[in-house]
Structure formats: structure tokens, C-alpha cells
Amino acid sequence: RDYFDVNTRYVGRKLLHILFPFVNRKWKRLSDSDEIGSQSISDHPKQFAPPRSDLNAPDLYIPLMSLVTYVLLVGYCIGHSNVFSPEVLGDTVSRGLAMHAFGVLVLWLGSYLTISSAPSIIDLVAFSGYIFPSIIVNILAFLLFGHTVYWAFLLYTTSAYA
């Protein structure tokens, strides 16, 4: 439930954070005590602030809405070329979720091999889903400006996501 605890301001700032990560200086998660301004009690496990209060917190709202937007945008592109069928949307969802699952698996394996306390699977699902806004920007660049600008956007968004 905390993964969907977002507001409009958070979504806008997070999308900018995803697309322009080079301008961000703070990458540390905030704890609940940082959000409230009080001291944390050492007897309790550390609880992180919800996404609406912490820009670095993983959320599932942006990945989910970005996946839906991606599917609709692919449907529009295929419909624009006059070869649309409803199965295209189902195929796009299936492929998008399969690639998303592969990304989660790669992140999980990488964190398992390198970090002593690996993040939760839900956190990895959120982090892996942040690729969809970049994909949407690339598709829009191709639709609006053509191949040359698309390749420039692709180079930028790939380096931003890395």
C-alpha cells in the first residue's frame, strides 16, 4: 500500500528525477523519523518514509501507469500504420511484462551477488519499472521528430537509466 502513496507533486518530481538523474545530489532514502523531524528509537527497525515524502523511495504507481501508457502508445503507433488489431495490446502487455520480469531478475541476481542485504522483490519491481518513462520519451521522440532525434534521445535516456 505504501508503494502507491503518491501525490501529483511527487509524480512530477519523480519523473524529472528519472529522466534527469544527473542533477540530483541526494540519493539517500529518508526514514520516518527524518520525515517527522524526531529522533529514531534504536529498538525499532528502521522504517523508510513513504514515496510522497521521499523522492528516492520506490513506488509502483509510476511503473504501472507508464506500462499502461506504453501499451496505449504502441497501440497508437500500430493503428497509425493501419495494421491495428486488439491482439496487439495483449501482445504488448505480455512482452512488456516479460521484459520487466527479466529486468527484475537481473536486478535481483546482481543485488544478491553484490549486496549483503538485498532489497525486497517489490522494490526491485519498482526500480525495474522506471525504464518505461524513458521508453515512452523515446517513442514520442521518434513519432514527433524522426530517426535522427530518436537516436539522440535513445543515447541520452540509456545513459540516464544506467
Image: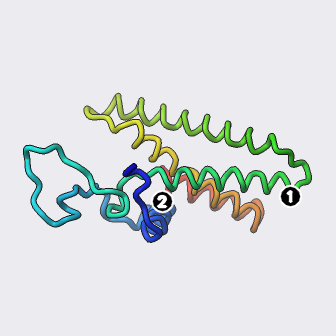
Query: Label 2 neighbourhood size at 10 Å, few (<14), some (14-19), many (20+)?
Result: some
Circle 1: is it few (<14), some (14-19), or many (20+) Cα within 10 Å?
A: few
Q: Report x, y in % for residue 55.
A: 36, 62
Please identify, in this view, whether the residue under mark 2 or under mark 1 is nearer the observer.
1
- What whole-number distance in Å separates the C-alpha atoms at marks 2 and 1? 29 Å
Label at residue 80:
1
Q: Is residue 113 left or right of residue 145?
A: left
Does residue 28 appear left or right of residue 161 in this picture?
Answer: left
Residue lying farthest to the bottom in this orientation: 9
Q: Which mark is residue 99?
A: none
Q: Residue at x 65, y 56 (%)?
A: 69
Mark 2 secondary-structure assignment:
helix
Given the image, on which type of amino acid does mark 1 rest? Answer: His
Residue 99's image quarter? top right
Tag 2: residue type?
Answer: Ile
- In the image, residue 135 above or below residue 11: above
Where residue 13 appears, as percent x and y from the top left, is 44, 68
Which residue is pictured at 41% across the width and 51% down the height? 3
48 or 162: which is nearer to us?
48
In-front residue for pair 7/22: 7
Residue 134 spot, x, y in % from top left: 58, 56
Q: Are marks 2 and 1 in contact (CB under 8 Å)?
A: no
Residue under the point 44% across and 66% down: 7
Percent x, y of residue 161: 50, 52
Rendering quarter of residue 4: bottom left
Rendering quarter of residue 6: bottom left
Q: Name the element at disc 1.
A: helix
Looking at the picture, tell me which residue is in the foreground, 112 or 88. 88
| N-terminal-most mark, 2 or 1 | 2
Q: In percent of the image, x 37 and y 65: which residue is there?
A: 24
Task: Residue under label 2, please give it.
Answer: 18
* Relative vertical location of residue 69 with respect to residue 45 in this rendering, above or below: below
